Amino acid sequence: MDDVPNPYIHSNKAKELELKKDLQEAEAEYRRAVQAADSLPHQEYTRDFNTALDRMRNGVSQSNKHLPEDALPELISAYRELLALPFLTRTQLAGFYARHNALAEAKEIIEQALAIEADSMGHAGNHPEAERRAVELLRNITDILGPSNAEELFLLHFDKLDVNKNGFVDEAELKRAQLDLTVPPEAQSMIRYLLYHYFAVEKASNDEFGEEISGISKSDVRNFQKTAKSNWKRLKE
C-alpha cells in the first residue's frame, strides 16, 4: 500500500523541525500530516473496522471468517487509530499553533478537530483522553482570546461588576462575579478573559495615576482590546 498517504512521516518530521526552531517548515509539515490523514481511504477502513468488530462481538460469519481470531484486538485498535487520524493530526497542528502564540489559528483548528471527532468517529470508538485534552486546550485558548465583544460586555455589565462603585473593577470583584448566577454565560467568558490578562489590562491606560485605587476601568479594557486584536496573529511567513 505504498500509494496510501502516511501522516506519521509528516508528523514526526514536523516535531523534528519544531525542535530545530524551523517554525515555517514545521507548520507546513503539520499541515501535510492533516492533508495525508484526510486522504486516507476512510470508507475502506470503516468497513474493515466494522467487520472486525462484528467478529469480536457476534462471532464468525460469512463476511468476517477470513479474520484471524487472535489478531482481532490489534486489528480493532489499529483501525480506531487510522480512523482517528484526521482528529489527531489536527490536535497536533492546533497544539503547535498554541505553543507559538498563533491562538486564533489554534482555536480554528481545534474546533475543526472536535467537529470531526463528533461527526465521524463515534461509530469507531473515540480517543477520550485526546478529546479531553482538545476540549481543555480549546477552553484555555478561548479564555485567552476572549469573546470578540469583550469591551461591549464589560460596559454592559460594568455596574454589576463594580460592586464598590469606585469606577474600577478589581480582581476580587471579577472573582466574585464568577460565582454570581445572575451573570450570563457570555459575560462569564469575558470575566475569565479579564482575569487571565488582569495585570496587562490594568496597565492599559493611566487612569489610576495619582489615585490609591487598583482595578480595571472602561478605558483599560478599550485600550487592551485594541492591542490584543493585533497580537493574536498566525506565524510569520
Image: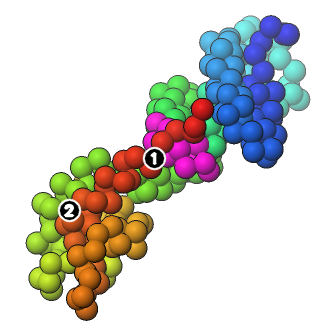
Residue 102 is a magenta residue: yes
Q: Distance of mark 1 from mark 2, alpha carbons?
A: 20 Å
Q: Quadrant of residue 20?
A: top right
Residue, disc 2: 154
**Placement of the C terminus among the 4 image quadrants:** top right
Residue 198 against residue 77 in the figure, above or below = below
**Looking at numbered disc 1 in the image, what kind of residue is underneath it?**
Trp
**Marker disc for residue 232:** 1
- Which mark identifies residue 65? none
- Packing grade of label 1 (10 A; few <14, some 14-19, many >=20) is some
Task: Place residue 92 in its image quadrant.
Answer: top right
Query: Where is residue 53 shown, x and y percent of the image?
Result: 69, 25
Answer with left or right where residue 63 lies relative to residue 74: left
Secondary structure under badge 1? loop
Q: Residue at x 53, y 25 (%)?
A: 120
> Crowdedness of circle 2 by 10 Å Cα count: few (<14), some, many (20+)?
many
Mark 1 or mark 2: which is in front?
1
Q: Earlier in the sequence, mark 1 or mark 2?
A: 2
Which residue is painted at 48% across and 42% down in the image? 233
**Residue pictured at 25% horizontal, 81% vertical:** 208
Residue 149 image position (x, y, % from top left) = 24, 49
Residue 48 vs residue 227, the one in the foreground: 227
Viewer-side residue, 16 vs 180: 16
Which amino acid type corresponds to the residue marked 2 in the rendered image? Phe
Dominant secondary structure (helix, strand or loop) of the stretch shown in magenta = helix
Out of 188 and 104, give the one closest to the viewer. Answer: 104
In magenta segment, residue 228 = no
Task: Specify start and end residues of the magenta stretch as a single range.
Answer: 97-108
Q: Is residue 173 above or below residue 183?
A: below
x then y, percent, for residue 132? 56, 50
